Every structure is written in structure tokens, then in C-alpha cells.
Amino acid sequence: MYDVIVVGGGISGLLSALVLGKHGKKVLVLEKRKYLGGNCNSYRVDGFQVDTGPHAITHLQKGPLRVLMDRYFDYIPAFIDYGTYYSRTSDGIKPIPSNLREFVTFDVLPKKDRLMLSQALTRALTLFTFGIDMSKESVYSRLPHNLSEDTYNFVDTISYFLSGKSMKETSIYRILEGSSFVRDSVMYETQDQTITDQLAEQITNITSLGRLVTNKTASAQAYPRGGLKTLLGSVLHSLPDNVEIRTDTCVKQILTDGGKAYGVSTDDESYRADTIVHSGFAKDLPSMITDLPADYLRDLRRIDQARGLCIWLGLSKQLKEFDYIGSEIWFKEKAYWAMPISNYSHTIAPKGKQLVGFMFAVKDSVKSEKRRAWETIHRVFPDIEKYIEMTHYQVTIPEKASVSIEGYIPGVRTPVKDLYLVGTDAVARSMGITRAAFSVIDLLKCVREDGYLKP
Ligand SMILES: Cc1cc2nc3c(=O)[nH]c(=O)nc-3n(C[C@H](O)[C@H](O)[C@H](O)COP(=O)(O)OP(=O)(O)OC[C@H]3O[C@@H](n4cnc5c(N)ncnc54)[C@H](O)[C@@H]3O)c2cc1C
């Protein structure tokens, strides 16, 4: 008998196990794969160390992961400043503007369009500041209607980057939040004074029109030295002895009785616990629990997801095109987000070589998307083929629920007593690993409120 069973050993499941374990709970983590970490992982391919997709970890100075690291980690990984987001054109790379001042000189887009976009951004931020809900209005709906095709493509690419969806499906709020124009204003009522104080102190600088001038998108973003596996390693090293982990163990059923969860079962065994934390896909719940309420089932069907194709290229030398720290987007034809990650750590590629990850949205079949992705890579870097030593593909779902206008985000609490959700489909705030960390802080809040952890 355990206090808590965590289904899934990705970063959100392991962070949940860490937090509850450090509060003295006896925790069992069940992971269906042979390895831990889920999408927060790195592995070797022909001498190059690839991550599960290119990563920039956001809100690291002041944010949920920082709070969890400061409070629960025994060992905190070293982070390297993320650098700059660039836009690539046939003339080379140019920093992507993150405030109006920088926008003025962003001559990648026509001057008239820049002016109109600046006005649209100022208007949206003003409305938001006055309390207008921008979470159901699409980015496209607020754009002027006589912009150039390049400008629409640029905005569409940024939308895909921030929500995994097109500008017609992405909300204005998501764009403002993802570009750091607005900060999350939700107070952290965890009943844990230390966490509340720490986060309250950090979340002081909420939305302000002043950010139109001073905003810096890339600040407080970083990449873990040594790769994503370093972050995973530091969570694993910090786990107390009362956390037990079993890999290669797929949970098939979450056992409930009278609307209360009391355990899980695999093909061979069942395990009992007072509380179950599910960190797999919330979309999977209907196949794991027999008696979910009909309205919850209907909502879970509305969860929206986007797929991504990552093409890792191991290059035989460091190309001058990738001589920068940060990442680049290409927004014409088939858009990409690319990151030369070996520039962060020498151990990622063999000496003198380079590793670059190209990330594409998958809207069609993987086969046709691969073909189009290669067409773009060859168009943008006509000579690259000569230097490719290693090619590695990953097709993934980067976030378990896209924050799109029509999509549904279930939240940490479920209609089943003592069953909670964590992960990138449990909260809408922020992105990726930061979003996963937000869900773990929300979990802590819920279990305290439900009397399961002492204040
Ligand atoms: C290509 C790509 C690019 C990304 N870029 C960024 C970025 O730039 N910045 C950023 O912060 N984040 C980024 N992310 C997202 C980030 O990696 C994820 O948000 C994060 O790792 C998700 O963690 P998770 O624990 O919520 O989910 P997952 O990693 O999906 O973990 C869930 C785990 O549960 C296990 N599981 C599921 N069902 C069961 C079951 N029934 N029984 C047992 N185990 C089960 C799975 O095997 C998995 O290990 C990116 C992700 C990808 C794929």
C-alpha cells in the first residue's frame, strides 16, 4: 500500500513524486517505457547527443521550475543563457523583435506592415490591461486585412511556435503571454507560506504597457549545460528513498469505487494508494476509468493536440551559418524552428562537429511533411548536404494539449476523488517544462486544499 501512485515517469510525474516524497509520502512511480524522462530526455546517435526536440526552458529566473528547484532539488543543474531568437531570410539572420523599439528596425517585414502590427499589438495589450478577456479571440481576427503574405506567414509561424496551432486557432492571450508581454497574474494560494511568498515576490511585474518598450523575450530562458538529461538527472538524484520507481510497467486501469480512486492495475498486478496522480495523456483517461461523468468525457474529447517533426542533423564541421547562441525561425513556405544545440555544450557533438535540430509542424502525413521539410532545408542551406554525417528523426506531441481557442484543458482536479492530473495538459499557463512545473505547483495546492497534505 502506497500513499501516492504516480502514473508516468516524465518530468511532470517525477517532479510530482519528488515534491510529495519530500513531504514524507510513500510514492510509487510507474512508467510504461524502459526509460524515465518522457520528452525531457537526451540520448546518443552516432556520437551526437540529441534531446527530444530542441528546447528552450523559459521563466527560469522567476517561475515555477525555479521555485521547485530551490525548494526540493538537492542538486540544481547549471543553465546556460539561451541567447537570441533570430529570423532567417535569404540575407542571413536578424534578431526577432520582442518590443516595439526593436520592431522599428526589423526590416525583414515591410515598413507599413510593421507599423500596423505595432498598432495591433499596442491595442491588444491595452485591451488586456483593461481586463478584456483575450483568450477566445484569435490572433488572425485582430490583424489588419491588408498585410503582405510574408507578414501573415511570419505571424502564423510565431503562432505555431507558441501554441502548436495556426494564427486562426491561437488566442491573442497566448501570443502576449508567450512573448512575455503579460505575466501570469494568478496568485499561488498554496497555503505554503514559503512557496506563496517566493512566488508572490516573483510575480510582481504583471502586465504593463511599459513592457511594449522594455520587453525581452529571451531573458530568463536557458538550456541545461550537458543537455536535457542533466535536468532529468538532477530530479532523479534529488528523489528521497521513500520514492520507488518501476519502469516497463504500463498502467491499464485506474481503479475507482463510488467515484473515488484507490489504485491502478497493469496486465499482471494491481497496486493500491490513497491518491493517484496521472501524468500520461488526459485524453487516455476514458480508456482507463469506467465511470467518468458524461460531461467530463465530452470535454476530454475536445483536447486539441499538435504533432511535431524534428530532424536532427549531425554536421562534420561547425558551419558559419550556425555561429550563434539561440535559435532561428524560417517563416516562408514550410516554416521551421532550428537550434544549433552543440553551441551550448562541447560534449553534445564530437570535437569540431555541430548538431542542429530543425523542428516542423506536422499538419499532413509524416511522409509528405518530411519531404517538404527537406525541400526547405535544402532551399535555405543549399550546401548543407555535403556536411551531413548523421540524420535522426523524431515525431512527437510536444505538449499534451495545445492552448488553442477551441481546445480544452482539464485542470489538475478531476471529477474522481483522489485522482489528480499533472503535465502539459493539466494547466494552460506557459509552455513545455515550465507548464509541467506549473501543474506540479497546482497539484500541491490541490492536495493541501483537500486535506491530504498538512498546511
Ligand atoms: C520536439 C519537442 C520540443 C519541445 N520544446 C520545448 C521547449 O523548447 N521548451 C520547453 O520547456 N518544453 C519543450 N518541449 C516540451 C517538454 O519536453 C514537455 O512539455 C515535457 O517534457 C512534458 O513532460 P510530461 O511529464 O508532462 O509528459 P511526458 O514527457 O509525455 O511524460 C509522460 C510519461 O508518462 C508515461 N506514461 C503515459 N501513459 C502511461 C501509462 N498508462 N502507464 C505508465 N506510464 C505512462 C510516458 O511513457 C511518459 O514517460 C518540447 C517537446 C518536444 C517533444
Image (cartoon, rainbow, N blue to C red):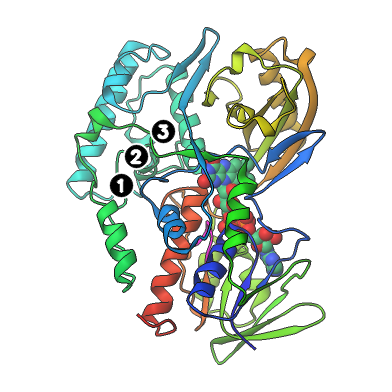
What amino acid does circle 2 point to? Ser
- Number of numbered discs: 3
Q: Does the magenta-highlighted stretch encompass residue 424?
A: yes
| Residue named by callout 1 | 183
By secondary structure, the bulk of the magenta-drawn segment is best described as loop
Secondary structure beneath dot 1 equals loop
**Left or right of residue 197, residue 63 in this image:** right
Q: Quadrant of ligand 1?
A: bottom right
Q: Nearer the viewer, residue 26 or 39?
A: 26
Q: Name the foreground residue: 384 vs 302.
A: 384
CA distance separating discs 3 and 1:
14 Å
- Residue 372 in the image: state x and y as whole percent: 70, 25
Quadrant housing the C terminus: bottom left
Residue at 31%, 67% in the rendered image: 194
Q: Compared to 31, does 402 lie above or below?
A: above
Relative image position of residue 334 (x, y in whole percent): 61, 25
Q: Nearer the viewer, residue 148 or 425?
A: 425
Specify whether 406 is left or right of 391: left
Decide: is 135 above or below 392. below
Residue at left offset 61%, top offset 12%: 320
Q: Is residue 316 above or below residue 443?
A: above
Magenta-highlighted residues? 422-427
Crowding around mark 2 (Cα neighbors within 10 Å: few <14, some 14 to 19, many 20+) is many
Say what secondary structure mark 2 lies in.
loop
State how far apart marks 2 and 1 are (Cα).
Answer: 6 Å
Residue labelled with disc 3: 218
Q: CA distance from mark 2 to mark 3?
A: 9 Å
Circles 2, 3 touching at the beta carbon (< 8 Å): no
Mark 3 vs 1, N-terminal side: 1
Amino acid under label 1?
Answer: Arg
Q: Residues within 10 Å of mark 1 (few under 14, many from 20)?
A: some
